Image (tube, grey):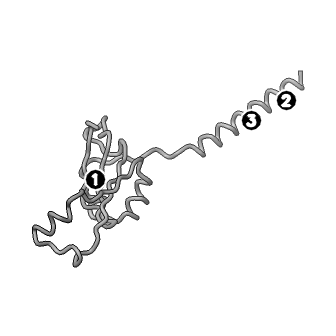
Amino acid sequence: MQFTIKKLFSFAMAVCIFATVSIANAAPPKKTYTEDEFLNTFSGKTKKVITEKLGEPFKKELSVKPSGANTMLLKAGADESKSKPVKVEMWYYKNIVKYDPKRTYKETEVTLVNDRVMNIAFFNNR
């Protein structure tokens, strides 16, 4: 009888320890923002700030220059050799911006130009 109680007590302690470790290692809940909070918090910020507060995006895209763009620029009189190169990236996050108390936009697009936020868009139709 005493041996069974010890086994039962040991099993219960193991379950408690396992549950505590599982809860401690669980990912923290993702913060959500209202539209205004998101715009005020991230507009004009650097890539480093975005990564620190939101983490890595689920998808990244780089902008590419369309074919024939150089010809059009020359026709317009623009001298590309005198301008600095521009790097445009689009980062996408899921379900982080609320549009009402119970629902979030499916995607938020953050456009970075030379590693600084220049545009933010919210989408439900992608």
Is 98 placed left or right of 31 in the picture?
Answer: left
Q: What's the distance in space between the residues labelled 3 and 2, CA to CA?
A: 12 Å
Q: Residues within 10 Å of mark 3 (few under 14, many from 20)?
A: few
Q: Residues within 10 Å of mark 1 (few under 14, many from 20)?
A: few
Q: Nearer the viewer, residue 9 or 18?
A: 18
Amino acid carrying label 2: it is: Lys
Q: Name the N-terminal-most of marks 3 and 1.
A: 3
Instruction: Kindly state the secondary structure of the residue where label 2 is placed.
Output: helix
Q: Residues within 10 Å of mark 2 (few under 14, many from 20)?
A: few
x, y percent for residue 68: 20, 59
Q: Give the residue at mark 3.
A: 14
- Which one is in front in this view, the residue at disc 3 or the one at disc 1? 1
* Residue at x-position 24% and y-position 49%: 121
* Residue at x-position 34% and y-position 56%: 62
Q: Name the N-terminal-most of marks 3 and 2.
A: 2
Which label sits on residue 6?
Answer: 2
Q: Give the residue at mark 1.
A: 37
